[in-house]
Amino acid sequence: MVNKSVVITLPIVGAVLLERSNRAKHIRMSIKPPSNIRVAVPVGVSFEEAQNFAEEKESWLQKQIQKFSISKSICLYEKSEQESKEEILQIKEAIINRVKHLSLKYKFRHNKISIRRMKSRWGSCSYNNDIRINICVSYLPQRLQDYIILHELMHTKIKNHSRHFWSELNNIIYELYEIRKELKYNYFL
């Protein structure tokens, strides 16, 4: 039987989960605050190779963990569990209305809009232009909510994250790069 995951211990950052991933094309590291580290290991890459990669990146991992500990991060996914069913329906309706408003304002064409809890994404846009937004966006400041919605709506026109995608998004979002940094470093799912 092939191992699907292995936990290793690095001297500075501690436990690191090495986990086999059928979707990963490259070795990828992710950190969930405060210090849960996961390394996605593609098929065909050994756990030993992934461990060497993690060991080489340990000082970078330590810096990222320090950033999380001093930032104003909050775990929005856990916070949203406290809402009543009626409040959740109101939140979903408000997000859907905002998607529709921004879609009309900037002339995007989408199909279905769905609001759900997602563990690792703020939103997504399917190949058929179905928009999915994480209910946790409701806890973000309005400019960050709009960024996430407009990001997914832009995918109805441009299906990748090319320079063209970011250039077009920058044309409609003031201070795009500052907003992206704020979301990345201050808010985590």
Image: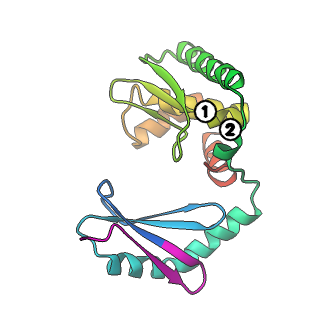
Mark 1: few, some, or many residues within 10 Å (few <14, many ≥20)?
many
Start and end of the magenta stretch? Answer: 1-16
- Give the residue type that dot 1 points to: Ile
Residue 80 is labelled as: 2
94 in relation to 83, above or below: above
The answer to whether residue 171 shows anywhere in this view is no
Can you identify the residue that label 1 sits on? 135
Residue 180 is labelled as: none
Residue 125 as seen in the image, left or right of residue 133: left
x and y percentages locating residue 100 in the rendered image: 56, 15
Single out the mark in the foreground, 1 or 2. Answer: 2
**Near-viewer residue (124 or 76):** 76
- Give the residue type that dot 2 points to: Ser
Displayed quadrant of residue 138: top right
x and y percentages locating residue 1 in the rendered image: 24, 71
SS category of the residue bearing label 1: helix
Displayed quadrant of residue 141: top right
Which residue is at a point 53% across and 79% down the rendered structure image? 58
Whether pointer 1 and pointer 2 mark residues with C-beta atoms closer than 8 Å, the reply is: yes
9 in relation to 1, above or below: below
16 in relation to 186, above or below: below
Residue 4 as seen in the image, left or right of residue 30: left
